[in-house]
Every structure is written in structure tokens, then in C-alpha cells.
Amino acid sequence: LKKIRKFQESDKATLTALWQAVFPDDPPHNEPSLVIEAKLAVDDLIFIAEEEDGEMIGACMAGYDGHRGWLYAVAVSPDQRRNGTGKALVLFAIKALKNLGCKKVNLQIRPTNTEVANFYKSLGFSTEDRLSMGTFIE
Ligand SMILES: CC(C)(COP(=O)(O)OP(=O)(O)OC[C@H]1O[C@@H](n2cnc3c(N)ncnc32)[C@H](O)[C@@H]1OP(=O)(O)O)[C@@H](O)C(=O)NCCC(=O)NCCS
């Protein structure tokens, strides 16, 4: 059995290690310790999945901008997958977004990532035909 809870300051090193292990190819601007710092400066929508003994086995981040909600960096330890942890994390994050008044949740994944697409489809997400655009702010 596992529980999902909010991030706390003492999780920082463990969460950094988890995200580094699960997203080894992320660009430098997504370096986990920087991401955590920046996120906590805005809100605390970081969620942790842990085993009964307290071991961290998953995490994710959510955001709400007053219009849409977003999910980011949903990660489950490789040796703990297909056991419902990812689903529990996403449902917990969605509930937190709903409590803030959010009515629509978006997420981005690479188009080649069909396994993760299947994960989100199993949770009721569907592909929306949009062009995702972005720019770096100097
Ligand atoms: C995606 C991820 C978070 C899923 O976590 P998980 O704990 O294994 O997922 P769950 O056990 O809750 O899976 C729920 C359902 O999603 C679907 N699913 C999950 N992983 C899947 C896979 N690799 N292939 C196909 N379907 C999958 C299944 O329907 C599954 O139900 P089932 O196990 O009863 O068949 C995990 O694989 C992960 O950390 N991947 C790498 C990180 C990543 O790419 N994250 C997304 C970017 S934001």
C-alpha cells in the first residue's frame, strides 16, 4: 500500500534523485533542484507517492494558472511501475487542481512516447490536435 501526499522540504534530495533517474535526458533548464526551487517560489503543487515504510516511489508536479491546469514530470521508480502508483499520483494531482477551481487539465509528451500516451489514455486523457509552441525568455 502506498500514500500520496504533498511535497515537504525534507523530500528535496530524494525527489531530485528520482527525477534525475527517470528523466536522465532532460535539458539543463529542467535540472530537478532548480525546478523544485522555482516551483516552490510560486506554489507547492508537488506530490509524492511513498510506500508504507516511507520510501519515495513516485512524484509529479501540477500547475494552475487560473485558466487551465497542467501536469508535469509524472515519474514512478522503474522497479515500481504497473502497480497503480502513476494513476494514484495523477488522480491526486487532478483532485488538487479541481479544488482550486480548475476545469481542464493539459499535459505535453513527446509524440514518440506511446507507452506514456497509453498511460494517460487509460486515465481518460485524449489527444488534442494542437501545435505546441514555446519560446525561451532571455
Ligand atoms: C508513465 C508512468 C508514470 C506510469 O506509472 P505507473 O505507476 O507504471 O502507471 P500505473 O501502474 O498507474 O498504470 C495505470 C495504467 O496505465 C497504463 N500503462 C501504464 N504504463 C504503461 C505502459 N508502459 N504501456 C502501456 N500502458 C501503460 C495501463 O493501462 C495501466 O493499467 P494496468 O497496469 O492495470 O494495465 C511511468 O511509466 C513512468 O514514470 N515513466 C517514465 C516517466 C515519463 O515518461 N513520464 C511522463 C512524462 S510527464
Image (cartoon, rainbow, N blue to C red):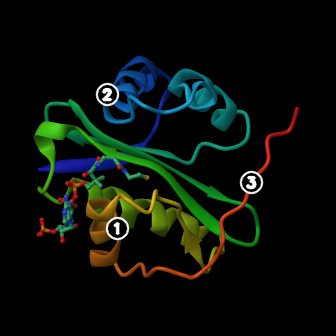
Q: Secondary structure at mark 2?
A: helix
Residue 70's place in the image compared with 68, above or below, is above
Query: Where is residue 109 shown, x and y percent of the image?
Result: 47, 58
Q: Nearer the viewer, mark 2 or mark 3?
A: 3
Which quadrant, please, contains the C terminus? top right
Quick one: label 1, few (<14), some, or many (20+) residues within 10 Å? Answer: some
- What secondary structure is marked by label 1? helix
Of the two numbered discs 2 and 3 on the same chain, state the one appearing first in sequence.
2
Identify whether 133 is placed above or below 127. Answer: above
Which residue type does callout 2 highlight? Ala
**Distance CA(mark 2)–CA(mark 3):** 26 Å
**Amino acid carrying mark 3 in the image:** Gly
Circle 1: residue type: Ala
Q: Is mark 3 within 8 Å of ligand 1?
A: no
> Mark 3 to mark 1: distance in Å?
21 Å
What residue appears at the point 66 percent right and 71 percent down from the top-left corner? 131
- Which image quarter: residue 70? bottom right
Using the image, tell me which numbered label, if any, was put on residue 102: none
Residue 117 image label: 1
Q: How far is the residue under mark 2 from the one under mark 1?
A: 20 Å
- Earlier-in-chain disc, 2 versus 1: 2
Q: Position of residue 9 (x, y in %)?
A: 51, 24
| Residue holding disc 2 | 21
Residue of label 3? 134
